Image (tube, rainbow, N blue to C red):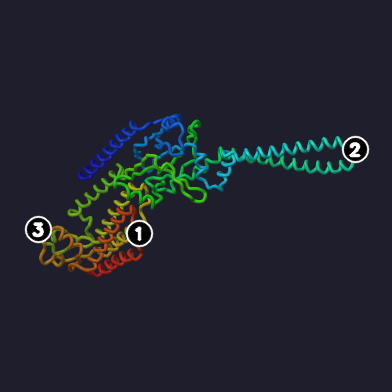
Amino acid sequence: MKSLFLLFRSVQFLVLFFCVSGFSVAADDERENLIVGKANLGKAVRERISASSPPKLLAFGEIMEGGKYRLMSPDSSLEANFSSDVFVVINDLDGLLSELSDPESEYAKNWKLVVEKTGDNQLKLAALDRAELKIKLEKIVNELIVKASDAPTLNVLNVERGKADLALQEAEKKEAALTTQVETAKRFVKHGFKPLSLNFRLRIGGETFDKLHPTDVAELIDLEKSLFLLRFNLRDMNKDRDAWLRLLKSSPKTCMVGDVALTYVSESGKKSYIGVDSGFRLGIPLFRWEFWTSMGIIAGCLGLFIWKVPTSDVLRDTGITLKNLTQPAPNYWHQHKHPLSLARLQMSIWFFIIIGSFVFLWSTTGSLAGVNNTALILMGISGGTSMFAAIISEKREWDAKQREPENASNRVVMNWFIDILSSDEGMTIHRFQMFAWTLVLAVVFVNGVLSDYAMPLFSNELLGLMGISSGVYIGFKIKEGS
């Protein structure tokens, strides 16, 4: 009970410490950077930019609870987490999209019609053609009136009048179609560009995160400077595994950090970069208070487990009873009623490794999907081996004097090692094989987690080798002491 009380107090202290640290960091950030409401966001950004600025990433920050916006200065780094909402502000987004879109795309064509006055010029030419044809028709009509008594000339003029009338109708239709096309293009440019803003992707540290797209279309926050806001939620950041791993490996071990920019993916898949020299930075601490609290709990459980191993049966095969124990015990081999269980040791090793790896990956990647099939199979093999070993060992007796080495050592670690690898007749090769493979694969597993930020995927052959090793152990255990 006393140990549990101390463990609880330690965890409580860790939680309190990191909560206080988090509040102090948040307070420092609020003092260093401007925090405004949505209504004043456009004005705050407008005051930071020059009179005429080309389209680019002008502002970056975090959307806080209560609808507040933390506006970062270019020389500071935003500390966020995987549930944070961040935003960027771009000016003249409609013009920028016309430059970034494919030349043959619908938006680029409509932009050319409206902004480059291509449509207006065509309308002017069409209006001139219509006016010219109308004047020509009026001349023919007047001439028909003058030469009404000249039958041959009148026939010729009637033919010309018919042709001029048809030409005028065609010119009027062409002008009406162009007018409709230009008006449609203006409406498209005014409203249709916003869906294209969903083609932006957040780019951090030179890595484009293809699944980190805006949560909604661009939002106009200032009409005077044509400022548009894009929102991103960092929860999908770790889904781009390759980009995430490259960014992690290029960052300090304790924090992912990188410059903030945008990538625009056009209709043909071409990528363009915006704001690569913006000066904004994003940092995500990898080992936050949640990590230290969870690891503190795991470390406390592991410490309690190790502390109880010498005085309890947590790692001992309680189905086997040692007989012929000398009392009082002259050495280690007569101090316990049950031998150490290799199967329980294996299960304990994989339990602590996998749960520790899960917490590590959850902290560094923000993902709860860290456990893979390899981890499940390893837990299954170790758990199944321990269960079958317990069934086989039920109500067996071993001779303690027969298991005791001829030259019993006083070193606890050596005695434990020999005890783990010994049956009722001493050390055995099948136990050593299972013990060796467990240690080797445990080292490989931990190394994979630390280097690749993911639980490694063992091949079927390697998992089969692990299963065979455990199967051989179970097979020989059936014969032990029978």
Look at mark 2 in the image and give the residue it sits on. 149
Horizontal and vertical percent position of residue 342: 23, 61
* Mark closest to the chain's N terminus, 2 or 3: 2
Between 366 and 406, the one lying in front of the other is 366
Question: What residue type is disc 1 on?
Answer: Leu
Look at mark 1 in the image and give the residue it sits on. 457
Label 2 neighbour load within 10 Å: few <14, some 14-19, many 20+: few
Quadrant containing the N terminus is top left
The residue at the point 32 percent across, 32 percent down is 27
User: Mark 2, mark 3: which one is toward the viewer?
Assistant: 2
Q: Mark 1 to mark 3: distance in Å? A: 50 Å
Q: Quadrant of residue 45?
A: top left
The residue at the point 36 percent across, 56 percent down is 372
Does residue 117 appear anywhere in the picture?
yes
> Mark 1 near mark 2, Cβ–Cβ under 8 Å?
no
Horizontal and vertical percent position of residue 338: 19, 60
Look at mark 3 in the image and give the residue it sits on. 328
User: Mark 1, mark 3: which one is toward the viewer?
Assistant: 1
Label 1 neighbour load within 10 Å: few <14, some 14-19, many 20+: some
Label 3 neighbour load within 10 Å: few <14, some 14-19, many 20+: few
Q: Mark 2 to mark 3: distance in Å? A: 149 Å
Say left or right for 324 vs 109.
left
Horizontal and vertical percent position of residue 363: 33, 46
